[in-house]
Image (spheres, rainbow, N blue to C red):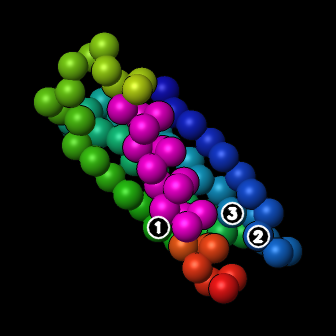
Amino acid sequence: MGRLDAFDIGAKKLTVQTEFFVRPVWRVETKVYLAGALKKVYTEDLSATPEGDLQRIVDTFHQTKMDEIVSGLRRLRQ
């Protein structure tokens, strides 16, 4: 369960990868790569999340991080 998006930022590729992990506890991690180098990792504990809500939570977490990154890039351009 997860999501992957990639964008061209100038001559470099920005990749945002969100994955769900079950061990040691349920958690979601979003990793941000620029030109293949890991730049940032965001983690959220999902151990108290009902199983039926997991995909929605993973999608929401990923989209929130994507929106934050895009907003930050737009501010840098101005």
Q: Secondary structure at mark 1?
A: strand
- Specify start and end residues of the magenta stretch as a single range: 57-71
Give the CA separation, mark 1 to mark 2: 16 Å
Tell me what residue is drawn at x 66 percent, y 69 percent.
34
Q: Secondary structure at mark 3?
A: strand
Q: Earlier in the sequence, mark 3 or mark 2?
A: 2
- Position of residue 46 relative to residue 11, above or below, is above
Mark 3 in CB contact with mark 1 (< 8 angstroms): no
Tell me what residue is drawn at x 53 percent, y 56 percent.
67
Residue lying at the far left in this picture: please name it: 48
Q: Quadrant of residue 60?
A: top left
Q: Nearer the viewer, residue 13 or 63?
A: 63
Tell me residue 18's x, y (percent).
50, 44
Say if residue 38 shows up in the picture. no
Q: Nearer the viewer, residue 74 or 49?
A: 74
**Residue placed under numbered mark 2 in the picture:** 9
Query: Any magenta on residue 60?
Result: yes
Mark 3 in CB contact with mark 2 (< 8 angstroms): yes
**Residue placed under numbered mark 1 in the picture:** 40
Disc 1 marks a residue whose amino acid type is Lys
- Give the mark toward the camera: 1 or 2: 2
Residue lying at the far right in this picture: please name it: 11
Give the CA separation, mark 3 to mark 1: 12 Å
Q: Earlier in the sequence, mark 3 or mark 1?
A: 3
**Residue placed under numbered mark 3 in the picture:** 14
